Each structure stands twice: as structure tokens, then as C-alpha cells.
Image (tube, rainbow, N blue to C red):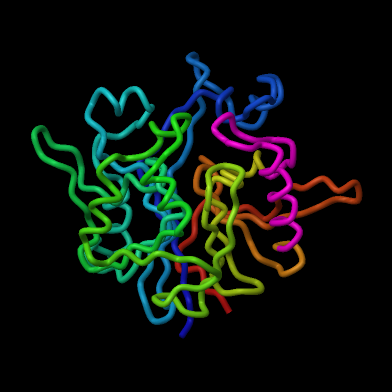
Amino acid sequence: MTIKLWSVLGNSQKLDGGAMFGNAPRPVWSKWIAPDEQNRIPLACRALYAEGVNGKRVLFETGIGAFFDPTLRERYGVVEDRHVLLDSLAAIGVAHGDLDAVVVSHLHFDHAGGLLAPWQQGRAPELLFPNARFIVGAEAFARAKAPHPRDRASFIPELCALLEASGRLEIVRGERCDSLGSDVRFSYSHGHTPGLMLAEIGGDGGVVSCADLIPGRAWVHLPITMGYDRYPELLIDEKRAFLDDKLARGVRLFFTHDPECALAEPTRDANGRYATCAPLAELSALQLH
């Protein structure tokens, strides 16, 4: 069965540029993404919707969603108060109840918050996607259940229990999962958070969701990491191996957080510097062969 891909925007964010670019100085990173008067840069929370993955309709990532109360929404720079992901899915004719599976690379709120219904005063958090399997890596799930003090604020306290209670949680421990079969291969990164799960769709010549290993085109440069990364040097080593593999096999890069680019091809010059080419702002029924 042919696999087709759509980029689907969720709620957008504005975060401190210095935090997003780690130890890179502002004169360097501000050439890539211009900051506002509060030193914040615009960031997408983009998901990837796929049809025909092992005969299923699958969403990769869910963005930050609209689960925050108004105070926290302002603190974390969430721009819109509605659940943009649901609107974006509806625009391509997909309701959240239509999905067969939802894959999340890790359970930080800017990737998993979209799993939850929009915030309402006095209402407990509840899951969306009532017919979907929730596919999460084992190590990432364990981290969310027992976070380190450094990253505890990045997780949603109620989410793990909701996923377990759904009866539709599928924990992944290797390269494949039962629901998605041979159409999706998972690899793992540990520099940003333990067990970050990177989903590659379609094999050689396909597309890989880069999640927070490479949030956008600017982070393809090897030395560039985020202040949020737990082990920057490890992440750089992982990024090099990841990019070399994708270059060798013609796999394109899908970016979650790049504000202007959904997909690009990796490149490497004679000096070993990595970059991208052939950027696409959005995907609409992109067909994988």
C-alpha cells in the first residue's frame, strides 16, 4: 500500500533564543531565526500525518496542544488558545477519532501535550484520539514516570496514568512495533532525553522524524545544541551518526520545530559540514515509493 504524508501544524510557541541554541552566541543564531524584543524566537510544533502505514492512519507527534491553563500558556509562550492540531487535521479531512495510531518521540509537553483535550476550568485532563494506539518508547515512558529534577517541569504529571488506563498504550523496545510493522523503523537518541524515539517511515528514500535530536535546519550544524539537552556532547555524536546514515540511504528530514520548513534533504560538504537543501514548507499527500 502506498504511504502518503502530510505536515500538520499544532500550536506554536515563542521560547528564549539563548535556551534554544545552548552555548551559541546571539550574533550567530539570530542570523538563522530572528528574535523578538524579549529575545524569544518563533517555533512550530509540527506533526506528521501518514496514511497507508501498515494499512493504518498514523500521527507522529502531537505538539504542545492547548492543555495549559492561561497562566502556564503565557509562561511557556504558547501562542494560540485553541487546539490548533485538531483544526489542522480537520483541514485535510481527518478527525482525531479517525486515527489508528499516535506515535510520540518522547513525553515532553511540547511533543505530547496535543494528546490532551483543551483546558477547561475545573475539568480534569482527558485523552483525545479515542480509537488510536498510543506508541511510546520504553525508556522515554520510564523517564516520564520518574523524571529527574532537571526536567520534571517538561512532563505532564497526569499523562502516563491516562495512557496506561486507556488500554491502548503500546510500549516499544526495539526497531519495530506490532501496530506499524515493517513500514516504520525506530532508532533512539539519549542526548536530549533518555530514549528519544526517532521514527523512520518507508526505509531507504523515505522520511525520518527528527524530533528534538534536530529540531530544525539550524540545528543540523553539528556544534549547535539546545540548553534543554541533557548531554550536549553525546547529542552531537548521535547527530553525526544519524545524519551520515540518512545521507547514505537518501532519507529526508522532517522537522518538528522549524518555523518555516517541514522537510529537507541533508547535505555534507567536502569539509564535513552538514547542512540541508531542497526545503519544503509543508507536505500535502507526499507519496513515498
Q: Residue 148 in the image: x percent, y percent?
A: 45, 35
Q: Would residue 227 be counted in the magenta stretch? A: yes
Q: Is residue 232 visible?
A: yes
- Whole-percent x and y of residue 5? 47, 67
Magenta span of residues = 220-245
**Quick one: which residue is furthest to the right in this view?**
270
Residue 87 visible in this rendered orientation of the protein: no
- From the viewer's perspective, tell me whether residue 12 is left or right of residue 238: left
Percent position of residue 229, x then y: 58, 36
Viewer-side residue, 9 vs 110: 110
**Which residue does the image show at 50% across and 48% down from the upper left?**
256
List x then y, in percent, for residue 277.
71, 53
At a point 46% along the width and 52% down the height, the residue shown is: 140
Up the image or down, 106 lies above or below 37; here it is below
Task: Name the residue at the left extreme.
Answer: 122
Q: Quadrant of the C terminus?
A: bottom right
Q: Is residue 208 shown left or right of residue 171?
A: right
Q: Residue at x 54, y 45 (%)?
A: 212
Q: Nearer the viewer, residue 205 or 134?
A: 134
Q: Residue furthest top?
A: 37
* Picture quadrant of residue 6: bottom left
260 left or right of 167 in image: right
Q: Is residue 257 above or below residue 207?
A: above
29 vs 224, nearest the viewer: 224
How many numbered marks does the figure carry? Answer: 0
